[in-house]
Image (cartoon, rainbow, N blue to C red):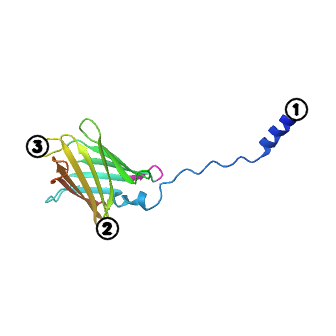
Amino acid sequence: MIATIVALLIAQASSPTPAPPSPATCEGPEFAAFDFWVGEWAVYAPGRDAPVANSLIEKLYAGCAIRENWMPLRGGGGGSLSAYDPKTGRWHQTWVGGGPGPVFFEGGPAESKMVLTGWWPGSGPNGEDGWTRMTYSRLDGSAVRQHGEFSADHGLSWVTSFDFTYRRKE
């Protein structure tokens, strides 16, 4: 009996161990849908010749996330982390800025744009709580527009709350 057990243990020890499954990768068009925003940018508001901010957008963590570092020339900064969730088929973004608490956005590509929407307390034109919808669109090979809209009526109507043009730094 002991000889049989020893023989089984020796056989198991000499058998090749199966390779662990490969980890999932963050490759494919779904994970690349927001890559047009990646870069180092000078950010302009409508009608301004001088930038209002700089922004560094990086694709990190084996291509699984996009991180923004928002650096306004006046006022507090902030940043976001965006990622595609293959289980839901949606993009998620968490923004943390100069105010308390994070803001969570969700959405995805729509007609070659990225559209993310989330509840943002105090973001209305008069400081009211409501929904913010951000639409990121390519303007050309060296610019991206980030158009923010606010809704106090659960998306029945929207007003522009910010409108930025990101121009790629040389």
Quarter placement of the N terminus: top right
Residue denoted by label 3:
126
Which residue lies most toward the left here?
A: 126
Along the line of sight, the residue nearer the viewer: 12 or 161: 12
Quadrant of the rendered structure where residue 98 is? top left
Q: Considering only vertical position in the picture, is 12 above or below 56? A: above
In the displayed structure image, the side of residue 49 where residue 21 appears, left or right: right
- Choose the circle earlier in sequence order: 1 or 3: 1
Q: Residues within 10 Å of mark 2 (few under 14, many from 20)?
A: few
Give the alpha-carbon distance from disc 1 to disc 3, as whole Å: 83 Å
Q: CA distance from mark 1 to mark 2?
A: 74 Å
Q: Provide the residue designation for mark 1.
A: 1
Highlighted range, magenta: 58-62
- In the figure, is residue 114 to the left or right of 18? left
Q: Say which mark, if any, is on residue 108.
A: none
Q: Nearer the viewer, residue 20 or 71?
A: 20
Which amino acid type corresponds to the residue marked 2 in the rendered image? Gly
Pair 1/3: label in front: 1
- The location of residue 73, given as percent across then percent down, is 22, 48
Residue 36 highlighted magenta (yes or no): no
Q: Residue at x 40, y 54 (%)?
A: 89
Assign a secondary structure to mark 3. loop
What amino acid is labelled 1 in the image?
Met
Quick one: label 3, few (<14), some, or many (20+) residues within 10 Å? few
